[in-house]
Every structure is written in structure tokens, then in C-alpha cells.
Amino acid sequence: MNRVPSSVRRDPCAVHRFQTMTYWRLFRNTSRSVSTAEGLAVDDTLPQSVANHGSPPILHLYTFVPSVIVGKYQDIESALKLDRCKARGIEYNRRSTGGGTVIMGPEIIALGLGINVDWPGLERGGVGGVFESLSRVFIRALDALGIPSQFQPKNDIQVSGKKIAGLSAAAETGKSLLFHTSFLVDFDVELMTDIMNTPLVKLSDKGYNCFSQRMTTVREELGRRVPLTSVMDAIQEGFEAEFEIRFQEDEPDSWEKETIQAFIRDRYTKPEWIFSHKHPRSRMGVGRIKTRGGLLEVYLSLSGGSIENVVITGDFFSTTQDVNRLENALKWASAREESISQKISEVWRDEMIYGVDVPTLTRAILLAKENQVRL
Amino acid sequence: MADIKGYNMPDDLYYHKDHAWARVDGTKVTVGMTDFFQKEAGDIVFIDLPDTEDEVSQGEVCGKIQSRKWIGKLVAPVSGEITETNEDLEEDTSLINSDPYGKGWILVIEASNLDEELKNLMRGDALVAFIEAEVKRAEDEKAKAK
């Protein structure tokens, strides 16, 4: 049974319509960009409300003030140049979901979804099903905006091999789940290179323009400014079509407001949370080898024993799409030789990088691992 | 009977419904995550372990496990005191994927109420039924979506 929102309760006809359709709640904030503490606290409340407060799934669409947010188990002091964030007035915080660093701001749509992991519209049960179903929502939304896109397992939505949205999720209360994504309407590359420590930033220091080969935005794809509200509309409609539901605009009730305030007070304004030391050790290294196809350079960042990020570059012949496919396959894989070789082999095809084969690429990555230094 | 629907589930272990396994040696219980869990979760990239000397209760969330796409919970299959955690996982969490019942062990609990609590864990026919139900649930969800 759907919980009837306060805005519907006063009208008996509306109550009847509501009870015979499947409605999800929508918290949509277009009036202002919110602080990281506020936005993240609302998001953490969503699965709590679904699990403990009888709410149907809730979608939260909003924007942040200019900010940068790390994943739950990232080393914030290695991931960010905190002095530059402070100098530029960029907020930083830590979210409760996994994954890597994201830049947020008034031109990037933030999305939080609280949903039961066994919701019948999901492609299959479990967290993997959430990713598959929700990726289709974003593909529909981009399609409606005139941008054909694909899901790049396991975490990205891509347009012609370039990332336009990233997905992350965390299991929360019981069987309910918080799902996060960021949707790039427009993006400040200069800001990213100034405040983040990633292999891509190291390359930018050398004059490579890596970002434009790896990321894109709605604005760049369409060649014009698009109102944020239009993109939010497209996302909403994507959900409605994919899950065969309707949204009811709503706002947090008093229980939810109290929960939000508790998360702000006890989590998102606490240095112990923001600077948490529960994370794997971060290291970075470079591997360079001469191959038949030219110089092959690999920039590797490691998080404990896993590959957090890898950038494959050099003066060989390949396509952006193929290089991105390889980089994506290696992301978050174990940095052990057999695992690296296996992940490359899973996506490899002949001449993917001219003059380079799987053992050679594996060797370059292992060399970068050998050369690792602590950040 | 180590193979259930393609998942390796050794006979000599006890299993919790949240996919932790327990190997009992006297009152010492070694704990890890099952082959079913690691296949569903994918590459494990971080494990947030409890401290040794922490007291845990059966069914209590005592840690978090992050794969590249989500953060799952580690549930204590029995009550007691945590006496050991696997330090090798700090450097290589993929051991949970590559050797879930061996080098990928997670922690050891000195159990405080073992005889009673083992009755709440699964093995044998109950385990087969549980895994089959989990697999069927996933298949049903997929069928509904088509």
C-alpha cells in the first residue's frame, strides 16, 4: 500500500487515484544549491525512510554548492588538494556510498534514490539489478535529450566512450538501499585539475588534454546550454517509463526532517567522519615501456591492493573508446598479475592498441605498480 | 555436496543467511564470506574490519565490505569476542574473491554461546534449500522484468 503524501490526503478523488497507481515520492529541489552536509543527509535519510518509516521509494533530485565529495572508503587527504579547496571556497565532504571522488556544483545534477533492493521492477534481485535497471533510466533520459548513450559496466554511463554519469551505491538499513549518481550537465575541468590528485591530473600537468577524451557533458554533446530543470524532467520521465510508476512531489515529513538533522549534526559536520582513516593505503606509480607500436605509458593509482584508477597513454595508435574500455575494465580490479591479465583479456580484441598485446600491457601496469610511491 | 547450483559451499561449514560462513574448532570460530556472496558482489576493494577484543552478537553487523559497485555488511554468525582479524586483507582484499574459504578468511570469534547458536545456522538440506531459493529469487526478479 502506498503511503499517501500530505498534499494528496485532502482530496478523496486524488486519494483513490493515488491508491490504485504505484507512486514514488519525489524530493525535487530547484530553488537553491545545497551544502554537502544537507544534500548528503537527505540522501542518507531516504533508505531509512523506506526501511523503517513505511515510505515507497524516494527520488531526490538537487544540486550542490561548488564542492567535491569522496567515496566512503577513500583517503580524502590523498584524493584532494585540501589547501586548494579551502583557498577557492570549495566544500569537501565524504558520502556514505562507495566509489571515487566527484566534483559537484550548480551545473551537475545530484541524484539520491532510496529503494527496496527487492523492488519488482528491478532487472534482477540484488544490488547488481539496481545498477542494471537504473542505468537504463539514465540512458532513456539522455535519449530523450537527444544523446545516445551506453552503460559501461560496472559504474558508468558513457557517450561515445566518454563518461557522462557515474553510479555508486551502498547497502543500508535491512534490504533497502541508497543509490547515488552525478549527472554532468556542465563541468569545470580547470577546477578539477586544481583540487584533485588523480593520474589524470598528473597528465594534465604534462600538457595532455585527457579530460576531454574521457569525460563529456550534456552541454558539450548538444552544443548548447540546457536548463537543469529540463534534464531533471528527462530523468524523472526515465524513471516513470522504466519502473512503470508515477512520481508524487513531496517533501520530508517531520520524522524525516529529524533524521536529516541528526545526519547533519552527527555525521556530515564531524571531522571524524570527513577525515575518516578507515581506508586502504593510496599510492600512485608510472610505468613506461617501448613497444612495437610506440611508447606505452601507464599511470596507476592504487587503493590498498586494488586499482583505483588507470590511465593508458603514449604515442601508439588506438581509439578513445578502446582505451577507455580497457581502463574501465581494470578499475577496482585486484592489482595482482593474474587479475590484471584476466581483466584485460575479457575486453581485448586484436589490434586494440596497435603493436601491443595483453602480456605487454600487463607488464606496463605491473611496472607502474613496482614504481608506486605513497601519496 | 560442495557444489550447490554452481556455488562452492563446503560441507564442513555452518552458514548464516547473510552469507557469512563459520568454521568451528572447539569454541574458536573462523568467519568468512561465501562463494555465493563473492560472486554476487564482484571484486572486493575494501573491508572495514572490527577491532580485536570487540564483543559481537549473533546476527550483528560487525563490518562493511565494499565491492566496486556497493557496500555490503559483514554479519557475525555467532556471538563472542573477536580474537583475530586477517591482516593480509589490508593489502589484498581480492583474497575474498580468489580463496573465500582459505586465505580469504576474515576474522576469528571466541564463541560464547556456540551450542545454542549453531542451531540458527544452516548446513545440509537447509543450506541447499536456502541457496536454491536465493537463486530462484534472482531468476524470478529477472523474469518479472521481462
Image (cartoon, rainbow, N blue to C red):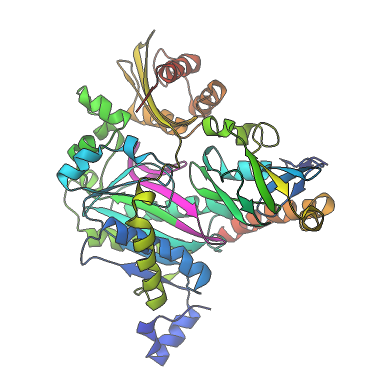
Q: Quadrant of residue A361?
A: top left
Q: Is residue A106 magenta?
A: no
Residue B67 x %, y %: 52, 42
Please state, as top left, top right, bottom left or bottom right, where the C terminus of chain B lies in the image.
bottom right
Residue A114, compared with residue B27, is above or below; it is below
The spot of residue B73 in percent (x, y) is 57, 51
Name which residue lies at 70% across and 33% down.
Answer: B102
Is residue A99 visible in the rendered structure shown here?
A: yes
Q: Specify whether residue A237 is in view.
A: no
Instruction: Pick the residue in front: A35 or B87.
Output: B87
How many dots with numbers? 0
Position of the N terminus of chain B, as image quadrant, is: top right
Q: Residue at x 34, y 74 (%)?
A: A251
Q: Nearer the viewer, residue B145 or B44?
A: B44
Query: Considering only vertical position in the picture, is A64 above or below B85?
Result: below
Instruction: Return the x and y of residue B135 as percentages of the image width and height.
Output: 68, 52
Judge whether A234 appears above or below A250 on screen: above
Q: Main secondary structure of the magenta part?
A: strand
Q: Which of A138/B102 is in front?
A: B102
Q: Residue B124 location in percent, x, y?
A: 83, 49
Q: Is residue A241 left or right of residue B47?
A: left
Q: Residue at x 48, y 45 (%)?
A: B69
Residue A230 or residue B84, whichever sits in front: B84
Q: Is residue A20 left or right of residue A32?
A: right
Segment tinted magenta in the rendering: A149-178
Residue A176 covered by magenta stretch: yes
